[in-house]
Image: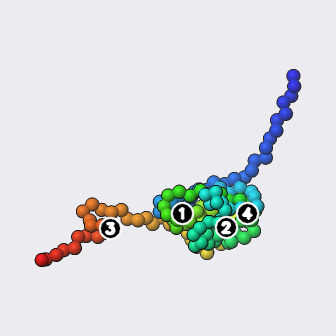
């Protein structure tokens, strides 16, 4: 009988975290790497609009050297570009905190902007029946 060689691959530490903002959902995956960040398979440096790119870079800049030791892949869906950017930055920040396990990193994020760790649960109010066009708009009363 031959002994079969068993090859064990070293387990690579990965962290999966989701972030939400309005109707947008972002799922971030963090694994050991060289600091590459992709949003919907697009490099962060090429992500448009620019204001969204700057918002996404905030948690990475605050993390400093820790962000250069990991690769981050984010997939976003739903909502508009602004809500997707907010959901993605929430997911990135949470994933970095969970991956590193650093309490001081969480404190840095909370001091800078609470919405890097805590989700913003505000939502558009749904339109009510019997109203004119918006959630609280009523038909204007006319006497003549």
Residue shown at 69%/53% (left/top)? Answer: 14
> Sequence-wise, which precedes: disc 2 or disc 1?
2
Q: Can residue 91 be seen in the rendering of this structure?
A: yes
What SS does tag 2 mark? Answer: helix
Occupied quadrant, residue 125: bottom left
Residue shown at 80%/41% (left/top)? Answer: 8
Q: Residues within 10 Å of mark 1 (few under 14, many from 20)?
A: many
Q: Which residue is mark 2?
A: 45
Occupied quadrant, residue 42: bottom right
Q: Which residue is mark 4?
A: 35
What SS does tag 1 mark? Answer: helix
> Sequence-wise, which precedes: disc 3 or disc 4?
4
From the top left corner, tell me how far across and down residue 70 is, in percent.
73, 60
Look at the image and tell me in which quarter the C terminus lies. Answer: bottom left
Q: Nearer the viewer, residue 43 or 112?
A: 43
- Checking the image for residue 60, the label placed there is none
Q: Nearer the viewer, residue 16 or 141?
A: 141
Q: Which residue is mark 1?
A: 84
For the residues labelled 3 and 2, the Cα–Cα distance comes to: 38 Å
For the residues labelled 2 and 1, the Cα–Cα distance comes to: 16 Å
- Checking the image for residue 134, the label placed there is 3
Residue shown at 58%/73% (left/top)? Answer: 51
| Colouring style | rainbow
From the top left corner, tell me how far across and down residue 55 is, in percent.
59, 71
């Amino acid at each position: 009988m031959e002994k079969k060689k068993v090859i064990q691959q070293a387990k690579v530490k990965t962290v999966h975290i989701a972030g939400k903002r309005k109707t947008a959902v972002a799922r971030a995956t963090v694994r050991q790497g060289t600091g590459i960040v992709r949003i919907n398979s697009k490099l962060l440096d090429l992500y448009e609009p620019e204001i969204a790119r700057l918002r996404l870079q905030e948690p990475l800049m605050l993390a400093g050297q820790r962000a250069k030791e990991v690769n981050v892949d984010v997939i976003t869906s739903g909502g508009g570009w602004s809500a997707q950017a907010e959901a993605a930055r929430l997911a990135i920040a949470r994933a970095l905190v969970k991956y590193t396990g650093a309490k001081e990193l969480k404190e840095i994020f909370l001091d800078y902007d609470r919405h890097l760790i805590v989700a913003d649960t505000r939502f558009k109010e749904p339109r009510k029946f019997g109203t004119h066009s918006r959630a609280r708009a009523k038909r204007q009363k006319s006497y003549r």
